[in-house]
Image (spheres, rainbow, N blue to C red):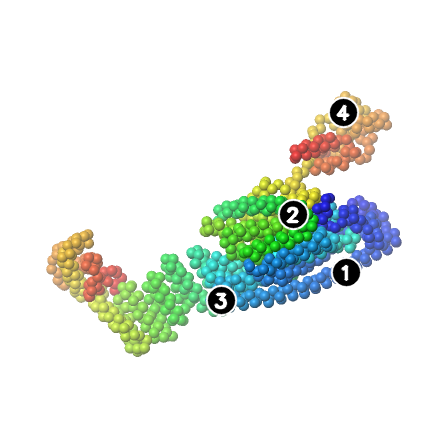
Amino acid sequence: MNDTVSSTIQTGVTGDAAASVVANGGPFELSDPEINRIAPTRGDRLFLVLSIFIGCLSGLLVVCFRISIEWLQVLLLGSVPHPGQYRLLMAPMLVGLIVGLLVKYFFPQAKGSGINQTKAALYIYNGYISARTMMGKFITSALAIGSGHSLGPEDPSLQIGAGIASLIGRRLHLSRERLRLFAPVGAAAGLAAAFNAPISAILFVIEEVIGAWSAAVLGSVVLAAVSSVVVARAFWGPQPMFHIPAVTLRDNRELLAYAALGVVGGFAAVLFSRLLGVLRPWLHSLSKSTQAFQPAVAGLLVGGIGFFGFPQVMGAGYETIDHAMHGEYLWHVLLALALLKILATTLSFSSGTPGGMFAPTLFIGAMLGASVGSVAKILFPHLTGSVGSYALVGMGVLFAAFLRVPLTSVFMVFEVSGNYSIVVPVILANTIAYLISRSLQPIPIFEQLTLQDGLVLPSMEESREETTLRIEDAMQPFDGQIFSGTDSPAAVATKLQQEKEDVALIRCAENRWYVLPAADLAKIQAAAGAKQSIEGMLPEDRVPFLYPDLTLNETLAYFTRWPLLPIVNRAVSGLLEGAVTQADVLRCYEKHVHGYK
Amino acid sequence: MIPTLTRSVSRMQPLTPAERNLRRKLIFQDTLSLLSLMGISILIAVLTYFFFHSFREHRSVLEKRWFARGEQALAVGNPKGAVQDFRSALALSTANPTYELALAEALADANRNVEAFAYFSSLHDAKPGDGYLNLQLARLAVKRNDSRQAIDFYRNALTGLWYGQGTERRFQIRLELAKYLMSLGRTLEAQGDLLAAEGNSLDNPAKLLEIADLLRQAGDPSDAWTAYRRVELHAGAKPPQVLQATLAGAQMSIALGQYKRAALALERYEARARQHPEASTAEKKQSVQRQLAQLQRLLQLIPADTLPPRQHAERVLMDRNIAHKRSLSCAAQMQAASTPNEDSTSLAVLEAQWKQLGPMTVEKLANDPALQQTLIAWTNQTEVLTEKLCGSPSGDDALLLKLAQVPDKSE
């Protein structure tokens, strides 16, 4: 890792150090095998019970985090900020300075949004997130967002949740493997509480953090997300995050307007990604001494946007989203807000100010959506539904195109609005935006950020698209001689010699197969009596049942024992479909890799 | 994950006493850890609770302050200022229905109809059966010229929930809807709503009078007359209301060609006006007197089917003579002006027909009902044509013209 990476990656320990932390100090200094021996089910049970605790604690901490942000907002920016107030300039700048110094000298790992840091904890640091990082994230993000930096609280909430999970797992001396799995569990809990949306949180963690539907962790993720949402709702109430006016698709022709929104959203996401892709590395390349002051400069610039007329872009901007949904702004104001938010978020995020990008993404999407909706309403007043429905779809569009989580984006719209009647426009617009964004910006934003930091984390988008190779892709028709178990060893040997083959494929009792190399056949032939069948002379083991639809890597374990693997039909027991050799499998992998490249 | 095989092997080998002891300790330690975790959770929950509520209280103070400012702004007729204040209150208490309602009302007052509609809509989502919200949405839809939505919302407001004075509010909404329908030219639908409103207001002469006026405006003189008559006969109606209804009822009767009924109504008016001189003005009394005199003369001119044959023939002949005289005078006027046109030609043709009939006697007419009908028709034609050619008539000709305009309805 280079210098940038070491200061950016948020775990605070190296991989080896993390491993040693996990390995040391189990209960009574018991090792994992010892615990497995005396209490083999302990891990499973604790994992589930702790998921609930993680959910509850994450929920409570996220509530505190949100309240802290709001308190700070009232104290620093006033209850309702208006343009022309000097505090709009001063607060983000001064707090930016404090945050910059805190990050530089106390919490270097609190930089960034929190998503990649959680992924790094999962994939690199065995689930280790230090308590200091978690505290730092809480304090610096709350200060930054509360003072008006254009960032959101969701991604830090996700990291706070993951941090809590890591802390609990370590205190309970869970195994390294379970500790790793706890990071996504906590992440889901944190995000669910921040969004008041358990399904979206679960899907996001699966789509972006874990990258696969893993049965080992799914139950715990669900438990933690639900627990945290229950806790959060005890404080915030059960209502959805946004108060959406009536959403209706008045006419199918209106889908054209939603498609246009998808196109606009796709291009906006690309613009946002490109700006981050340019500004963030440039700011990182500046001398180290400037880095503590970058958040202050970003704060001054963002404050300037607020001071000179657009205080709505400051902070997370939920109220503004709400206003846009109620059609309170004209289309050009909405467009200006979207563009200024892109600028403000790029400044805040690139400067290394801790805070998330979920809320700004929702903000930009809502403004663009409401803007497109307002234009559609002007052009086709009788075909268009409420502006609120466009703002709602716009949020999903940016979520799908910028964060590149298409499935989460659809459910997020449903959950934050509590409205399922807009499913068709959401899916249409999100898909268009996602495809545009993918074709113009092949590297997703989270991957782009990890690459900027010099890390190589698994690309979830790539892994979603990976083709799974199956046995049928490598399987060849078997054109050799098939022997019966009742044949004599001598007859088999003679036939093999005639056909000049190296192995004999023998059909045994109960439709099982045995693959006998020619060298072994000679030994059997020497030991066998004149009337003895070959099956009676074979060792007890048989080739396992392998079917054409199984994944190709399932064959690899058997080539040390069997030189050739017969592949059988699932419907007709013992019916031979073909065979694979190790060479076939390797050829298939090679072909796939070259084809992919 | 722990391999299943390892576990099953572990299970197969019984634990030694030392291992059992270790397991007990492990269970105890895990229980202790979970209990401490629970304790920490409870502690954080309590702290969060106080933190949360202290902030909520602070926000509550702020939002109330903004709301009060908004109400003040509204009270001094500054809806734009009120919008800002209510919006600030709402920013501090998102989705607060009271603030949303206040903001929506202020927006509507400030003529920011699109935003007001959006806010009322969101409130309506939460309470789709609320009469007030439906009414506000209907009014905003009227402003947006969305008649379909406006009528739907009006209807929802009629069937919606009203918290207090429901009957009165529904009555007013029905009248508002009827007026809106009339403004759209959908008078038949308006009449339906007015009749429904009438059915619910039989005990209230003031409401009946209002409905009757609207029925008259909606082009339904028959039902309007019924409503006026109800007011006239209503025991609780005040003298001015009775007089107003009687007079309007008489006018409806005239519109319907019910002249005898109209005359009787005017006679009743006069009698009641004498009883309650304070309820009518001298001007109105004189006007009624004039109308009554005209009606009485009109009744003398009408060749009613109920008259005996001779009397009927006399009336027909009298009317024919009046009309003929008017025809001759008009023809002379036309000749002087020498402006022939299609109507003047028709008048000439009519005059030729009159001449062709020759002198007419009551006896001749009384025995020839067909001739009577021909004469009535020609009389009507003459009055209509002369009005077109020579302007509005006066006196008996004016009355005959009135009969000619509604020949089938006349009594």
The answer to whether marks 3 and 4 sit on the same chain is no
Identify the chain of the residue marked 1, using the numbered disc in the image.
Answer: B
Q: Residue B34's spot in the image, x, y percent? A: 76, 58
Q: Which residue is mark 4?
A: A501
> Who's the residue at 31% across and 74% down the image?
B280
* Vertical relation: B278 (above or below) B145: below
* Vertical relation: A477 (above or below) A221: above
Question: Nearest the camera: A19 or A77?
Answer: A77
Between circles 2 and 3, the one closer to the viewer is 2
Q: Which residue is mark 2?
A: A283
Structural distance between the alpha carbons of marks 1 and 2: 45 Å
Identify the chain of the residue marked 4, using the numbered disc in the image.
Answer: A
Q: Amino acid at mark 3?
A: Leu
Q: Say what secondary structure mark 3 lies in.
A: helix
Does residue A460 appear left or right of residue A14 in this picture? left
Q: Amino acid at mark 2?
A: Leu
Structural distance between the alpha carbons of marks 3 and 4: 99 Å
* Vertical relation: A549 (above or below) B143: above
Residue lying farthest left? B359
Q: Which residue is mark 1?
A: B36
The N terminus of chain A, quarter of image: top right
Between circles 3 and 1, the one closer to the viewer is 3
Q: Amino acid at mark 1?
A: Ser
Q: Which residue is mark 3?
A: B74
Structural distance between the alpha carbons of marks 3 and 1: 56 Å
Q: Say what secondary structure mark 4 lies in.
A: loop
Does residue B275 appear left or right of residue B308 in this picture? right
The answer to whether marks 3 and 1 sit on the same chain is yes
Between circles 2 and 4, the one closer to the viewer is 2
The answer to whether marks 4 and 1 sit on the same chain is no
* Vertical relation: B266 (above or below) B185: below
